């Protein structure tokens, strides 16, 4: 065969097959590389005391409300206050025409003078009769009549004194005064109007606004759940915890309130019961009827675990799951139970323990079994949350 002759086609195919077999054997013999660790950010869980609160909607109502009504009939002569202004207890509000009541008072005083004169005469007669009776100049029956006349004169004087007192009271009712201190609304009558005793329409309404009430409602289901958690030892009651008030625009009111009343009856229509919070209102910023939210402490969870919300995901069935760095440095999926949020974190009921490293960043790059390189999350945000009691205490279910 010539040196320049080409190999046959079967020979070439054999050489190619041999080369492929050699390469395949080398690939099988080469060790497999471990996948590179994925950098992730984690939060190491630490047990802490957690104050659980509940935000409840409510309306403000005045601390004291007095509807001003006349107690005698009369014509309004003058209005003695400024509508919308502040009034003091006992301050005159209306002056009625008191001519009739003044005449009645004067008549009662005159009747008292007459009764007192009669009493003086009866006392003298009784004294003389007693002296004559001792000397047996008059019979005992006449002396007894003189004594009876004296007693009747004394009773007449007392009746006349009561009539004078009543006349003074009725005359005083002609000047209508404020029963409490507070802010008064608009007047429903003007000068010259006829008012009558015990009329249904109030002349004006006085309301005391400092302090002020915030009336809220809570569902009976929440109350039952709270009592079960307290009885089981999961929660500790927090009696006396200040109540934070949130205004309609979401801002925090400058003064904390105090829970003063909890109703013992559940409304069958709504399944809720009433709570009442007493709130200082020195600047009269809160007005009756305003919508607010009250953040009320419900209990303290000792040894509670809080996980950032981004560290908890839910599957299509709604079950909560967290990605945790295992002891081997690989990702583990944990089924967890969470019931409420505290600020921007979930409160964990079960599934996680203290010391677990929960992945909060880089979740889109991992799956169970993926090796990771964990980095602890910055604590600046947590410190800010702790510095802000409102952000720390807010709890929603």
Image (tube, rainbow, N blue to C red):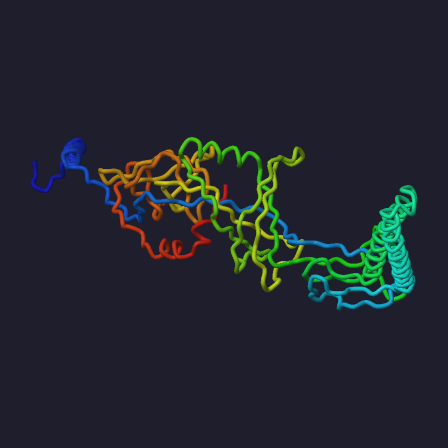
Q: What residue is at 28 percent from the left and 41 percent from the top?
A: 355
Q: How many marks?
A: 0
The image quadrant that residue 72 belongs to is bottom right
The image quadrant that residue 10 belongs to is top left
Q: Nearer the viewer, residue 1 or 39?
A: 39
Q: Nearer the viewer, residue 318 or 341?
A: 341
Image: 36 above or below 110: above
Q: Nearer the viewer, residue 144 or 354?
A: 144
Residue 168 coordinates in the image, percent (x, y): 83, 60
Quarter occupied by the N terminus: top left
Residue 232 coordinates in the image, percent (x, y): 42, 31
Q: What residue is at 32 percent from the left and 54 percent from the top?
A: 379
Describe residue 374's horizontal placement relative to residue 60 as left or right. left
Describe residue 272's horizontal placement relative to residue 177 as left or right. left
Asked if residue 74 shows in the view, the reply is: no
Asked if residue 42 shows in the view, the reply is: yes
Residue 91 coordinates in the image, percent (x, y): 73, 65
Q: Nearer the viewer, residue 22 or 190?
A: 190
Residue 137 coordinates in the image, percent (x, y): 91, 47
Image: 393 above or below 232: below
């Amino acid at each position: 065969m010539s040196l320049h002759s080409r190999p046959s086609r079967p020979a070439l195919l054999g050489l190619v097959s041999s080369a492929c077999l050699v390469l395949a054997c080398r690939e099988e013999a080469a060790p497999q590389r471990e996948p590179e660790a994925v950098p992730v950010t984690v939060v190491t869980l630490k047990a802490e005391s957690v104050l659980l609160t509940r935000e409840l909607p409510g309306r403000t109502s005045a601390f004291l409300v007095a509807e001003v009504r006349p107690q005698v009939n009369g014509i309004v002569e003058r209005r003695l206050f400024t509508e919308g202004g502040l009034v003091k207890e006992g301050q005159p509000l209306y002056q009625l025409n008191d001519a009739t009541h003044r005449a009645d008072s004067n008549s009662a005083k005159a009747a008292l003078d007459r009764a007192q004169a009669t009493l003086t005469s009866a006392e003298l007669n009784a004294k003389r009769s007693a002296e004559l009776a001792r000397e047996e100049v008059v019979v005992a029956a006449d002396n007894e009549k003189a004594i009876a006349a004296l007693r009747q004169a004394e009773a007449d004087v007392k009746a006349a004194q009561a009539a004078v007192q009543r006349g003074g009271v009725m005359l005083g009712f002609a000047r209508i005064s404020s029963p409490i201190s507070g802010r008064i609304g608009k007047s429903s009558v003007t000068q010259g109007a006829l008012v009558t005793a015990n009329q249904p329409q109030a002349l004006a309404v006085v309301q005391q606004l400092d302090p002020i009430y915030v009336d809220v409602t809570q569902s009976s289901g929440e109350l039952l759940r709270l009592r079960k958690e307290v009885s089981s030892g999961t929660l500790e009651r927090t009696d006396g915890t200040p109540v934070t008030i949130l205004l309609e625009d979401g801002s925090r009111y400058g003064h904390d309130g105090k829970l003063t009343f909890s109703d013992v009856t559940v409304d069958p229509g709504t399944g809720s019961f009433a709570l009442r919070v007493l709130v200082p209102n020195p600047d009269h910023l809160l007005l009756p009827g305003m919508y607010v939210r009250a953040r009320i402490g419900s209990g303290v969870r000792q040894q509670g675990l809080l996980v950032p919300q981004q560290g908890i995901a839910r599957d299509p069935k709604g079950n909560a799951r967290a990605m945790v760095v295992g002891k081997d440095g690989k990702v583990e999926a944990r089924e967890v139970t969470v019931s409420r949020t505290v600020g921007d974190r979930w409160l964990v009921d079960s599934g996680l323990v203290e010391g677990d490293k929960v992945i909060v960043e880089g979740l889109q790059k991992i799956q169970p079994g993926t090796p990771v390189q964990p980095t602890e999350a910055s604590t600046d945000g947590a410190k800010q949350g702790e510095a802000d009691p409102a952000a720390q205490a807010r709890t929603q279910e």
